[in-house]
Image (cartoon, rainbow, N blue to C red):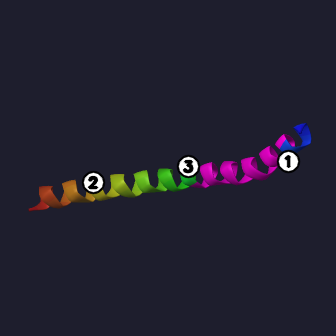
Amino acid sequence: MMEQWITFVQEISFPIIVSFYLLHRIETKLVAIHDALITSQMNSKNVT
């Protein structure tokens, strides 16, 4: 029974960890894009 739990955790935990890592990387890039768009919008309002 314990071996089944260990196998289950090993099979499931790796994809979960990789998914969270990739989501974190994507999130930081999306925040950077959002900030750049907001800055660009502010600059275009100041020009006109």
Q: Secondary structure under badge 2? A: helix
CA gap between label 2 and label 3 equals 21 Å
Question: Does 3 sit left or right of 40 as displayed?
Answer: right
Q: Amino acid at mark 1?
A: Thr
Disc on res. 24: 3
Q: Which residues are magenta?
A: 5-22
Name the residue: 80% across, 47% down. 8
Q: Secondary structure under badge 3? A: helix
Of 33 and 44, the residue lying toward us: 33
Name the residue: 85% across, 47% down. 7
CA gap between label 1 and label 3 equals 26 Å
Residue under pointer 1: 7
Q: Amino acid at mark 2?
A: Ile
Q: Amino acid at mark 3?
A: His
Label 3 crowding class (10 Å Cα cut-off): few <14, some 14-19, many 20+?
few
Disc on res. 38: 2
Give yes or no for contact between labels 2 and 1 (Cβ–Cβ under 8 Å): no
Res. 37 image quadrant = bottom left
CA gap between label 2 and label 1 equals 47 Å
